[in-house]
């Protein structure tokens, strides 16, 4: 069996607005291996959620391929895609709005079992009870409605629901951003434990590198609809080559002021243009401290920087970080 589970190639997602077409995801390519946790990180509005929804069939992609196992999901009709839905599940950012307010917790977990498992009613109840236990929910909560649960309990319920059909891939869209710090750690630890126990692959979408660092084995960095860097987590601090990745690293709490030298824009750019509106060149050019003429003229493509490391930059940082030194904060 191939290690490659998901292979996304040149994926593009557009939205029609009153001002015309807007490209939220622009020619994105990446892969996820079986049992891997890949983090997709970037600022709000960079296209992360649109990409995640396209993978699970909640958003139509206008161009590109989504190869899952040996099947191109992007080429399937809704009818042919339906049998594969159980294999790719999603955990949403807001745990309350993701749940039916009229549905008790037990029913929320049993419903995907009734759709995908073929289990008897009694077997579904037993499976739901097991899933509650797996995600750390007491069985006494099974009869409660979503509004009767805490934020952390709701997200655990969403995770149990996603695990119910025994998927091969779970897309987690900012699953801890609505929770306080202590609950964030609990949910991240839970996802790690469940991944190790079940072998499910996870795409973990986040804007917070300090959270991503706890869970991911690889990191993909997204900016203005494009992936600008992909690298192993172990190389994040020593080999980050794209200026935007360095900017994200510099914002992690604990870095000193002299380690935050990336500017929002050069002095002559008081009002930067929306990066999506740039007709040519690198989309990060207005915020980059190392911008040069070729950066304004042609867009960089992802290119190899070593094993498992790709960056889309004409002038990437060297592994030693000579241009901008960012040291990991000592906790």
Image (spheres, rainbow, N blue to C red):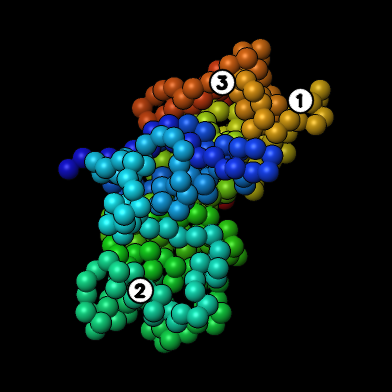
The answer to whether marks 2 and 3 mark residues whose Cβ atoms lie closer than 8 Å is no
Which residue is rendered at x = 37% and y = 36% of the image?
65
Tag in front: 1 or 2: 2
Q: Give the side of residue 185 with respect to residue 32, left or right.
A: right
Provide the secondary structure element on which disc 3 rests.
loop
Provide the secondary structure element on which disc 2 rests.
helix
Q: Position of residue 49 (x, y in %)?
A: 52, 49
Can you name the residue that lies furthest to the left here? 1
Provide the secondary structure element on which disc 1 rests.
loop
Quadrant in the picture for the N terminus: top left
On the image, numbered disc 2 is attached to which residue? 111
Q: Is residue 289 visible?
A: yes
Gap in angstroms between the C-alphas marked 3 and 1: 19 Å
Q: Is residue 196 visible?
A: no
On the image, numbered disc 3 is attached to which residue? 299
Q: Which mark is residue 266?
A: 1
Which residue is rendered at x = 44% and y = 22% of the image?
303
């Amino acid at each position: 069996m191939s290690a490659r589970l998901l292979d996304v190639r040149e994926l593009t997602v557009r939205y029609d607005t009153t001002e015309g077409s807007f490209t939220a995801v622009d020619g994105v390519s990446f892969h996820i291996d079986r049992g891997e946790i890949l983090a997709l990180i970037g600022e709000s509005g960079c296209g992360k959620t649109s990409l995640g929804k396209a993978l699970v069939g909640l958003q139509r992609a206008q161009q590109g391929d989504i190869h899952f196992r040996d099947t191109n999901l992007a080429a399937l009709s809704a009818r042919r895609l339906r049998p594969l839905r159980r294999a790719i599940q999603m955990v949403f950012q807001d745990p309350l709005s993701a749940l039916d307010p009229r549905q008790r917790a037990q029913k929320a977990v049993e419903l995907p079992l009734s759709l995908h498992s073929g289990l008897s009613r009694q077997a579904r109840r037993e499976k739901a009870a097991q899933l509650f236990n797996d995600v750390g929910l007491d069985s006494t909560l099974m009869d409660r409605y979503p509004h009767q649960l805490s934020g952390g309990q709701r997200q655990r319920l969403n995770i149990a629901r996603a695990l119910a059909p025994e998927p091969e891939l779970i897309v987690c869209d900012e699953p801890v951003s609505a929770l306080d710090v202590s609950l964030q750690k609990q949910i991240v630890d839970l996802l790690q434990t469940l991944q190790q126990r079940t072998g499910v692959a996870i795409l973990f979408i986040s804007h917070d590198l300090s959270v991503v660092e706890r869970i991911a084995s690889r990191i993909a960095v997204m900016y203005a609809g494009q992936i600008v860097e992909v690298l192993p987590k172990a190389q994040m601090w020593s080999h980050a080559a794209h200026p935007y990745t360095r900017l994200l690293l510099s914002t992690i709490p604990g870095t000193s002021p002299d380690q935050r030298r990336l500017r929002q824009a050069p002095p002559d750019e008081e009002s930067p243009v929306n990066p999506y509106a740039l007709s040519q060149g690198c989309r990060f050019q207005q915020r980059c401290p190392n911008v040069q003429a070729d950066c304004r003229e042609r867009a960089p493509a992802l290119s190899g920087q070593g094993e498992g490391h790709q960056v889309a930059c004409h002038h990437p940082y060297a592994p030693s970080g000579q241009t901008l030194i960012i040291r990991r904060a000592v906790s």
